[in-house]
Image (tube, helix red, strand yellow):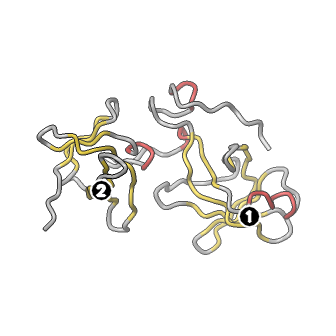
């Protein structure tokens, strides 16, 4: 295990995030279970974070975000088999079962132009083109074709679904954490 570094959500220089206001690390997947007797685990990488894992990549495991370095990696169907430095057998990784896996945000590749990772847009205030406040972006739904943003004014209000495509997303202001949308009208 690598010594856990302090994580805060305040500033880029202390969070490890290249963008102010973003979290220091993001959940990129989960460990499903141990595999075999040599300390390997089956890792499921979430599709919204197309991370290129390699030997030496430091992953943060569980809610305590304990840091472990990848010693070996290989593809297995839709998942990966990972072995971490210092994990000698299956007993050493039993506690990893069903644990979330995080990566320092600074190690994410830049999202393509006009695209955003979920952690970059969640919590944004959303307005229509007339300046009317629609609510906060509370969920990013992965549909396969394109993401869909769920916006709610408050817990009891009806949700507004906004396709995350150019014809509906007018402007995203990273600094203000605001989004202007062309609100879809559904019949």
Residue 124: give x, y in percent of width and height.
34, 40
Point out the tag, 1 or 2, that comes first from the N-terminus.
1
The image quadrant where one finds the C terminus is: bottom left
Query: Which image quadrant is residue 143 in?
Result: bottom left
- Label 2, secondary structure: give it: loop
In the rendered image, the vertical position of residue 20 relative to residue 84, given as above or below:
above
Left/right placement of residue 177 relative to residue 12 reads: left
Within 10 Å of disc 1 (Cα), the crowding (few <14, some 14-19, many 20+) is many
State the residue at coordinates (45%, 29%).
20
Q: Residue at x 61, y 54 (%)?
A: 53
Image-based side of 108 in relation to 161, left or right: right
Tell me where residue 165 appears, x and y as whole percent: 25, 56
Give the percent coordinates (x, y) of residue 85: 80, 50
Would residue 186 appear left or right of 15 to someone viewing this image? Answer: left
Give the image location of residue 48, x and y in percent: 46, 57
25 and 123: which is toward the camera: 123
The CA span between labels 1 and 2 is: 38 Å
Above or below 75: residue 166: above
Quadrant holding the N terminus: top right
In this figure, which residue is indicated by the disc labeled 1? 41
Q: Which mark is residue 159?
A: 2
């Amino acid at each position: 295990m690598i010594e856990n570094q302090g994580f805060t959500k305040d500033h880029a220089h202390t969070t490890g995030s290249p963008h102010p206001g973003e979290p220091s690390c993001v959940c990129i997947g989960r460990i499903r279970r141990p595999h075999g007797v040599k300390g390997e685990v089956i890792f499921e990488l979430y599709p919204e974070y197309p991370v290129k894992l390699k030997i030496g990549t430091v992953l943060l495991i569980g809610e305590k975000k304990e840091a472990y370095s990848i010693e070996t990696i290989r593809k297995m169907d839709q998942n990966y088999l990972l072995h971490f430095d210092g994990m000698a057998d299956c007993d050493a990784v039993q506690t990893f079962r069903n644990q979330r896996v995080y990566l320092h945000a600074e190690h994410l590749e830049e999202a393509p132009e006009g695209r955003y990772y979920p952690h970059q847009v969640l919590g944004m205030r959303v307005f229509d083109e007339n300046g009317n406040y629609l609510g906060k972006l509370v969920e990013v739904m992965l549909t396969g074709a394109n993401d869909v943003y769920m916006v709610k004014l408050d817990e009891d209000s009806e949700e507004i679904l906004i396709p995350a495509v150019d014809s509906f997303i007018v402007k995203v202001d990273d600094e203000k954490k605001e989004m202007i949308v062309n609100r879809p009208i559904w019949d």
